Image: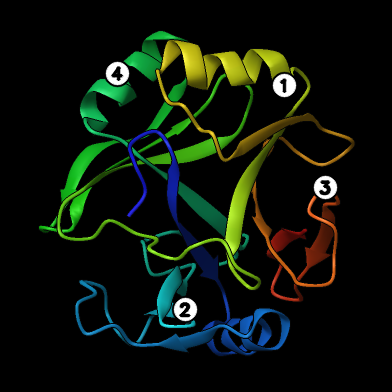
Amino acid sequence: MRPAGEFCWMDLKTPDLDATERELDAALGWECVVDPDDHRDPATARKARFDGHWMAGVSRVDSDARPPGTEPRVSYYVAVEDAAAVHDTAVSAGATSVAEPSPIGDLGVLATIVDPFGAAVSLWQPGTFAGWTHSAAPGTPRRLVHTSVTPTAAAGFYRNRLGLPMTGAVFRTRTGEPPGWTAVIQVADRPATTFAPVHLPSGHTFLFA
């Protein structure tokens, strides 16, 4: 379980569930299975696990009422104690509300914003599901990287305006890519200071470190 103010989960949306499962297995060694405790339809949603820990949700991009042709994406969740309070503070500080706080059964409360720098992020107030439980190890997410044209201001927005420590986050100047958050996956054969983008055929991008 991750403390409040730290990233705690990610969810991959894909047009081809089976192909993405094969890619995650080949690239990361993650196995995608149906979680019996998941509230979502097992025909369109599964979870990826590695070394006995859940790594990510994986679901069809059209499973949440989005139109056909919607681009693949990865949603990142930061743990918060009060999703409504953080959501409202973010909006008052210039963020755009994408989804207002709403309970997801007894799993938790979810809200989504786009920060003033163009990056989407979800706020997760844990209930029965807290997200990541793994320790830092090869094959697992180790941190998140935020890219924008003003990384210092972006860091201040999260850490000062929203009061989220985000000790596992890195804020960088974007170099051509759109603003956003990207997960850094630890691999055994690469120095921890080196971030190498890896683009999966499904359209999802991660950084290997």
Q: Is residue 178 above or below residue 17?
A: above
User: Marks 2 and 1, Cα distance to the nearest angstrom?
Assistant: 31 Å
Q: Which residue is mark 2?
A: 48
What is the distance, in whole Å, between disc 3 and disc 4 at their CAs? 35 Å
For residue 193, the mark is: 3
How many C-alpha atoms fall within 10 Å of the one at disc 1: few (<14), some, or many (≥20)? some
Q: Which residue is mark 4?
A: 88
Q: Earlier in the sequence, mark 1 or mark 4?
A: 4
Q: Is residue 209 left or right of residue 157?
A: right
Q: Quarter of the image containing the N terminus?
A: bottom left
Image position of 181 with respect to 105: above or below: above
Q: Amino acid at mark 4?
A: Asp
Residue sitting at x 58%, y 67%: 140
Q: Quadrant for the C terminus, please.
A: bottom right
Q: Nearer the viewer, mark 3 or mark 2?
A: 3
Residue 79 seen in this snapshot: yes
Whether pointer 2 and pointer 1 mark residues with C-beta atoms closer than 8 Å, the reply is no
Residue 169, x across and y down, in percent: 60, 37
Cα–Cα span, label 1 and label 3 = 18 Å
User: Residue 196: percent from the left, percent from the top?
Assistant: 85, 57
